[in-house]
């Protein structure tokens, strides 16, 4: 289908290329985490028991690591066996699976995770997990994001407006996210062998066949050998609930009609499929909670808190790409504010959190008349088209 993403479009800081049946996933930049992520990814694959790897169907690709250079010339490359499968995201966006099939594949993937992967390793909680996942990530991201003058409009405001709705701004989000209450929410009694990067562009399926667990593979794990289970559901929710795929593949429009006021809209084409995936994800919350011995409501609260922090930190990593897309960074920060609004309503006011609810932007007013999300015409479409070039982004951010 026209507009379907390239086969090798990824989400990390790495360069990806295909040579001799191997995907070369290479990082040569200045951020330590870029190298570390690949080294840990390899370690994660190596920790998979042989019995689980040789099941006749590749649950994971074979991988090996190449380290080169030193200092500023340092390169880290993960060589990954190419599997004859497609990610769920790319299959959905190319129209190769419909909503029913997509939901079926996601259920199959969850069956594999619960049946084979989570139980590979487990341990009682280490001290400092919440610290590492929460305050350090926030501090690192904040230092980076604040250094971008283009994001000043978002960081300097107590409140912002998204699609006409007033919301608490980033200063409030940061205070809440680094609070002891949030740390307590994120503390879990037991850790498991989570995937850690569980979104639909890291789940490989065979789009031409009926969904079955034996045809699911996983790529691109975060690399933490143990982690809190809510991290996986939170990561899935970034795409199922919070529009990660639409932002990543440019299926959105973003405008700033005035200081502190933003318009963020998504192409509706894939909405029914993502709504179906959200239903599966929401229904799986009780299974996740049961697996780690938590009450479902508490588990979902932790998941929401984790997603707020994760999305904020994702904005930072996208700012640190070689060619940062400031529209995308801004979109993630707006998503973080929207999630924060949902999280505080549900967590602090003690509303039933059993369901994640509708997709994050569902129910928000559609674009104003004359605007054309996804199209080229109209005030709104023009902003989207202009902001594709770097200078136009700067002009746009500097306006008003
Ligand atoms: N083993 C594989 N077999 C088939 N396709 C793959 C494989 N590994 C990666 N890909 C494709 O390349 C994309 C990027 O790879 P990934 O490891 O997820 O990198 P990133 O960390 O940048 O997201 C994936 O979304 C998928 O489309
Ligand atoms: Mg990936």
Image (cartoon, helix red, strand yellow):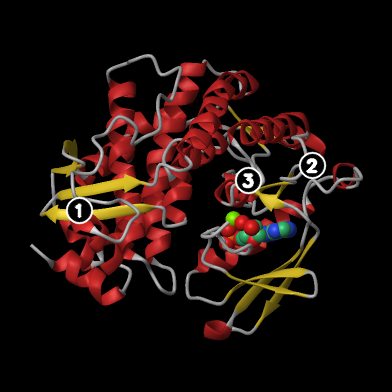
- Residue 198 visible in this rendered orientation of the protein: yes
Of callouts 2 and 1, the N-terminal one:
1
Disc 1: residue Cβ within 8 A of ligand 1's nearest atom: no
Q: Are marks 3 and 2 in contact (CB under 8 Å)?
A: no
Residue 55: horizontal and vertical position, in percent?
90, 42
Q: Which residue is mark 2?
A: 215
In whole angstroms, how far apart are the C-alphas of marks 3 and 2?
12 Å
Disc 2: residue Cβ within 8 A of ligand 1's nearest atom: no
Q: Residue at x 27, y 51 (%)?
A: 372
Secondary element type, mark 3: helix
Q: Going by the image, does 23 lie left or right of 103? A: right
Of callouts 3 and 1, the N-terminal one:
3
Of callouts 3 and 2, the N-terminal one:
3
In whole angstroms, how far apart are the C-alphas of marks 2 and 1?
44 Å
Q: Which residue is mark 3?
A: 88
- Viewer-proximal residue among 130 and 154: 154
Secondary element type, mark 1: helix
Residue 102: horizontal and vertical position, in percent?
62, 36
- Viewer-proximal residue among 145 and 199: 199
In whole angstroms, how far apart are the C-alphas of marks 3 and 1?
33 Å
Secondary element type, mark 2: helix
Number of marks drawn: 3
Q: Which residue is mark 1?
A: 154
Which quadrant of the rendered structure holds the C terminus? bottom left
Is 347 above or below relative to 155? Answer: above
Q: Say which of marks 2 and 1 sits in front.
A: 2
- Residue 40 visible in this rendered orientation of the protein: no
Q: Going by the image, does 363 lie left or right of 97? A: left
- Viewer-proximal residue among 176 and 162: 162
Which quadrant of the rendered structure holds the N terminus? bottom right
């Amino acid at each position: 289908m026209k507009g379907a993403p390239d086969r090798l479009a990824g989400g990390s800081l790495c360069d990806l290329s295909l040579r001799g049946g191997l995907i070369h996933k290479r990082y040569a930049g200045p951020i330590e985490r870029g190298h570390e992520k690949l080294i840990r990814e390899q370690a994660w694959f190596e920790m998979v028991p042989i019995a689980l790897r040789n099941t006749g169907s590749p649950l994971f690709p074979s991988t090996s690591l190449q380290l080169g250079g030193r200092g500023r010339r340092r390169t880290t490359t993960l060589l990954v066996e190419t599997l004859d499968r497609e990610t769920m995201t790319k299959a959905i966006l190319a129209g190769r699976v419909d909503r029913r099939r997509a939901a079926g594949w996601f259920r199959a993937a969850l069956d594999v995770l619960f049946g084979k992967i989570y139980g590979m390793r487990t341990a009682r909680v280490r001290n400092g997990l919440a610290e590492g996942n929460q305050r350090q990530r926030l501090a690192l991201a904040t230092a980076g994001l604040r250094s971008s003058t283009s994001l000043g409009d978002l960081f300097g405001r107590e409140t912002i407006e998204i699609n006409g709705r007033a919301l608490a701004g980033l200063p409030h989000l940061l205070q809440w996210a680094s609070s002891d209450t949030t740390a307590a929410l994120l503390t879990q009694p037991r850790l498991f062998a989570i995937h850690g990067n569980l979104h639909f562009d890291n789940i490989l399926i065979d789009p031409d066949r009926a969904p079955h667990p034996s045809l699911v593979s996983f790529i691109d794990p975060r690399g933490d050998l143990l982690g809190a289970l809510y991290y996986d559901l939170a990561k899935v929710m970034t795409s199922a609930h919070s529009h990660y795929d639409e932002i990543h593949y440019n299926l959105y429009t973003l405008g700033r009609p005035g200081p502190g006021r933003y318009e963020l809209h998504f192409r509706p084409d894939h909405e029914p499929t993502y709504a179906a995936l959200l239903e599966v994800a929401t229904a799986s919350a009780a299974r996740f909670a049961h697996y780690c011995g938590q009450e479902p409501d508490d588990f979902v609260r932790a998941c929401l808190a984790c997603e707020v922090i994760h999305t904020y930190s994702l904005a930072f990593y996208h700012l640190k790409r070689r060619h940062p897309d400031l529209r995308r960074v801004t979109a993630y920060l707006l998503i973080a504010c929207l999630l924060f609004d949902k999280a505080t309503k549900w967590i602090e006011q003690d509303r039933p959190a059993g369901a994640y609810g509708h997709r994050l932007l569902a129910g928000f007013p559609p674009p104003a008349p004359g605007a054309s999300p996804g199209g080229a015409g109209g005030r709104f479409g023009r902003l989207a088209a202009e902001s594709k070039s770097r200078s136009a982004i700067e002009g746009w951010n500097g306006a008003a």
